[in-house]
Amino acid sequence: MSKRKNPAGDDNLNADFCDFLMELAEYEKNVTRNIHKYNAYRKAASVLAAHQTRIKSGDEAKSLNGIGDKISKKIDEFLQTGKLKKLENIHQDKNAQAISMLTRVSGIGPVKAADLVNSGITTIEDLAKNKDKLNHHQLLGLKYFLDFEKKIPRSEIQEIEKIIHDRLKKYDENFTITICGSYRRGKPESGDIDVLVTHPSVKLSKKNKDDKFLSNVVALLGDIITDTISLGDTKFMGVCRLSANHIPRRLDIRLIPSEQYYCAVLYFTGSDVFNKQMRAHALENRFTLNEYSLKPIGETGMPGEPIPIESEEDIFDYIDYPYKKPEERNV
Ligand code: 8DG
Ligand code: CA
Ligand code: CA
């Protein structure tokens, strides 16, 4: 069995703990819809993955930031018995298993999955027989169910990146294009393709926005885009395919006003645990940071005007956070 890497690039000595914590996290997100527990399990997994030695007891784990009493007890139980009663029970729970399965379909969230299960629809086969209950996104999720579960190799995203780059730059050299997400963090494979695009003429301040801008961008990529899930003024969600011999892939394109580009690049590069840490650090230094802007928090506690940002490094500088290259954001 291959050992998993931790963010420092070394082997993750606590990978078995991380696996069960991530499984519990998914359960809390999809079945119980308890976002706090979901975040707590993920935080704990991330802390353990980054830990440089093998954890030998719950007590030892508890000394780490983000691991409390309940998770430390689970680590003890796992060390002593090799399993977790809670997970065993979840595996026996037909309802939970059906909801987990259905949420794997793109476009089906926890609420829709629970609805479907309540009306007796519990499998992918059941979905295929009840298409009338699915919206356009969910129908595409069903159609491409197996394809979308397959990871995208880095080399394939590089090819797609080149095509997007060539098409857009040929049309107008002032386009800026960044593929964010796990790809930008240097991962060898990704779940989907997160493209951010901006252009000097796309301005927040511009009131009469050109609502054809993004559809023009999408049209330039017509030969690799096979389906549109949704197309708005700022966000395209769809499916792309390099050739008939390739697997269809999930592709998102966001058109970002130039003033907000670097905050968006930072946000959509993630990881989302990294984003949380950086936002918390910003708050400690009296700034609010989100996908749109960085704002100073004034004496009254109200955020002020957005700070002009020219690069990702600017954002780190302002909040006094040591710069992390995208590959160092895999927490
Ligand atoms: P993957 O696709 O290879 O599975 O990983 P990813 O690229 O890291 O995840 P993603 O779900 O595609 O999200 C891309 C980035 O967007 C993520 O790394 C951080 C940021 N992000 C958050 N929260 C959220 C959210 O709730 N939804 C989405 N779509 N993106 C989010 O920080
Ligand atoms: Ca992604
Ligand atoms: Ca995505």
Image (cartoon, grey):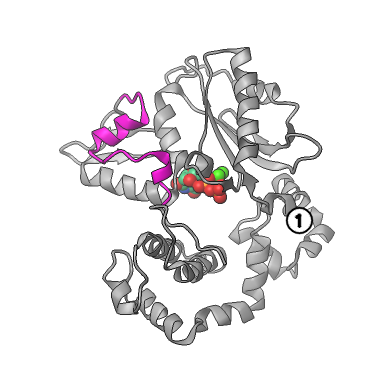
Q: Position of residue 81 (x, y in %)?
A: 47, 87
Can you say whether 196 is above or below 63 in the image?
above
Q: Secondary structure at mark 1?
A: helix
Give the quadrant of residue 87. Answer: bottom right
* Within-10-Å neighbours for mark 1: few <14, some 14–19, many 20+: few
Give the quadrant of residue 162. Answer: top right
Residue at far bottom of view: 81
Q: Which residues are magenta?
A: 308-331
Can you say whether 8 is above or below 155 in the image?
below
Query: Which amino acid, by three-letter code, is at mark 1?
Result: Lys
Q: Which residue is mark 1?
A: 133
Q: Nearer the viewer, residue 303 or 274?
A: 274
Q: Residue at x 44, y 34 (%)?
A: 264
Q: Position of residue 119 (x, y in %)?
A: 73, 68
Q: Position of residue 41 (x, y in %)?
A: 43, 66
Judged left or right of residue 88, residue 323 is left
Residue 214 visible in rendering? no
Judged left or right of residue 168, residue 223 is right
